[in-house]
Image (tube, rainbow, N blue to C red):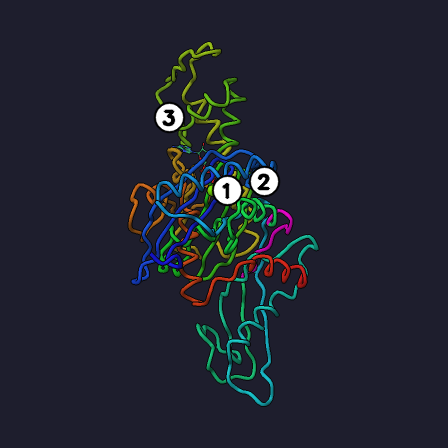
Amino acid sequence: MASSDLMVGLEIGTSKICVVVGEGRPDGTIKILGVGQAPSRGVRKGEIVDFETAMKCVHEAVVDAETKSDVMIRSVYVAISGSHIQSFNNRGAVTLPEDRDEIDEQDIEDVKINAREVSIPAQNAFLHSIIQHYHVDGQDGVLNPVGMLAEKLEADFHIIHGVRTRIQNTIRCVKELPLEVEDVVFSALASAQVVLTPNQKGLGALVIDIGGGTTDYILYVDGAVKQSGCLGVGGDHITNDISMGLRIPMTRAEKLKIDEGSAVLGNCLPGETVQLRDDSGFAGKEIERETLNTIINLRLRETFELLKKKLEEEPFINYVGEGIFITGGCSHLKGIAHLAEEVFELPARVAHAQTMSGLTSAFENPQFSAAIGLIKYAQAVQTDRPRPRRFGRIFGKLFNGMRLS
Ligand SMILES: Nc1ncnc2c1ncn2[C@@H]1O[C@H](COP(=O)(O)OP(=O)(O)O)[C@@H](O)[C@H]1O
Ligand SMILES: [Mg+2]
């Protein structure tokens, strides 16, 4: 198998490290060859806080993926998260020189660079400039302007940026192993590649990826990314609330949340309880079911309301025709889609990766959406720009970000 057909996605999550090995097929589909996993340590709210420990965990997950897929991993696409990730929309413009009237590839690059000529915080670097729409001499809705006659090319971009050192630390953690980093991709952008179909992006959709310590989101209208970002709160906060509220150990609280918890209230019989059996060092306890669900409901409701408030700073949420797609480990929580519908007043569903072949169990698990999405992202990048791999590209990109910030 030619190594260029192989693509590897790595997500360094707060709960788990996940490595997905995929193979690009000539028909454009992807086959998942194997998934490696390791519990995550040294990561808080999506960001590395203990470098050595995180590195060991990544290594463990990579070795696991190598064993499962029978592939030697040399380079990876890495998902990045953390509440330092920010975004905005901006328009770039270029005027064609007098002696040329046809738009070329360089103009496309230049208009992107122009759109980045805005001030972002000095410590930040650009992660993505995602094209929304081109405008050719005022004509809207142009999909591919190369070759068109024009005097002026304008383009709207969704620009995602984050704190440079935090991005670099993630890259370093992988490079030290040593593995090459092909690209760094915002987690929710990766998830959306496999959770949504192009049609759903066109009709408008919001993807919410709720993991252990973060809630990553991305919103599409008319097939274009309009809003994206990350809240530093996730499923582990629910577990923490259960532990504190019911005065039980964290491991017990986690198991209770997964096995018995629900985000919906009013479905229990009055006085219905869950019995926690005694265990080494734990005396056992009777928990009122509605109390447990109330703790879950309150935290999750607060998270959704926080997100709703952020999204409502712009009008795009009103154009989300296909509704909300919840993914990530926390989407397993019973009743979560129901609660999202209540808060956002939009249809909501739990979603996992689609349009793949190979390991069914892998892409049916919403915990793997981001890592699988990286493979799809990688395939799109490689199809778009068929050229030899350029290692060290990330540092070039970050450096570029520094110059432009
Ligand atoms: N079956 C389940 N029911 C409820 N929550 C779950 C379930 N499985 C995992 N989770 C929660 O999902 C979170 C981890 O999600 P994941 O997407 O793997 O996180 P990350 O990408 O941050 O590592 C944890 O808070 C965990 O408790
Ligand atoms: Mg995640």
Viewer-proximal residue, 299 or 98? 98
In the image, what residue occupies the spot 51% across and 37% down? 14
How far across and down, in percent of the image, does residue 237 sit?
52, 32
Furthest residue to the bottom?
Answer: 99
Going from the N terminus, do you reach mark 3 or mark 1 first?
1
Q: Which residue is mark 1?
A: 12
2 and 1 marks in contact (CB < 8 Å): yes
Question: The residue under label 2 is which amino acid type?
Answer: Ile
* Gap between marks 3 and 2 measured at Cα: 29 Å
Question: The residue under label 1 is which amino acid type?
Answer: Ile
Q: Which residues are magenta?
A: 158-167
Q: Secondary structure at mark 2?
A: strand
Above or below: residue 47 compared with residue 121: above
Res. 259 mark: 3
Is residue 302 visible to the viewer in this orientation of the structure?
A: no
Viewer-proximal residue, 9 or 55? 55
Viewer-proximal residue, 295 or 400? 400
Q: Badge 2: few (under 14), some or many (20 or more) residues near its Cα, within 10 Å?
A: many
Q: Main secondary structure of the magenta part?
A: strand
How far across and down, in percent of the image, does residue 347 sit?
38, 47
Quadrant of the picture in which ligand 1 is shown = top left
Q: Secondary structure at mark 1?
A: strand
Quadrant containing the C terminus is: bottom right
The image quadrant of residue 263 is top left
- Tell me: is circle 3 under 8 Å from ligand 1: no
Going from the N terminus, do you reach mark 3 or mark 2 first?
2
